[in-house]
Amino acid sequence: MQAFLTLGKYLTLGFWVLPLLALFGALGEQWSQYMLWAGVFVFFAHLGELLLVQGKLRACGKAGIMDAVMVILVGFFYWLPIFQQEKS
């Protein structure tokens, strides 16, 4: 399970490279537009996810700015191990 979560973190962080490349015009015109829209969609999905789990993160003592940034960047790959650890 830990290997899956680690791989997911790296793949999600790797995804964020694509919208950044699209911002700088390194992709083709059509691909840049698709990647920017994908980045906007994932950003707002992770922002909504942060709103949903913020209370639980605060209860675990993980309500700092860097915790919020990590949820926005990698989503449940960040908070799932925290909640599993808290249950144990």
Image (tube, rainbow, N blue to C red):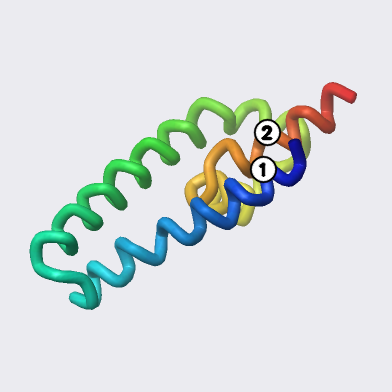
Question: Where does the N terminus fall, quadrant-wise?
Answer: top right
Q: Residue furthest top?
A: 87
**Residue drawn at the location 67% of the way across and 43% of the way down:** 5
Q: Which residue is mark 2?
A: 80
As drawn, 11 above or below 29: above
Q: Is residue 86 left or right of residue 42?
A: right
**Residue drawn at the location 63% of the way across and 50% of the way down:** 7
Q: Amino acid at mark 1?
A: Leu
As drawn, 60 above or below 6: above
| SS category of the residue bearing label 2 | helix
Asked if labels 2 and 1 touch by Cβ distance under 8 angstroms, the answer is yes
Q: Quadrant of residue 79?
A: top right
Q: Is residue 1 left or right of residue 13?
A: right
Question: Where does the C terminus fall, quadrant-wise?
Answer: top right
In this view of the protein, which residue sits in the foreground, 86 or 61?
86
Q: Which residue is mark 1?
A: 5
Q: Is residue 43 left or right of residue 22?
A: right
Total marks in image: 2
**Residue drawn at the location 83% of the way across and 32% of the way down:** 85
As drawn, 18 above or below 48: below
Q: Residues within 10 Å of mark 1 (few under 14, many from 20)?
A: some
Q: Residue furthest right?
A: 88
Image position, residue 23 (x, y; %): 23, 70
Image position, residue 8 (x, y; %): 58, 46
Q: Amino acid at mark 2?
A: Leu
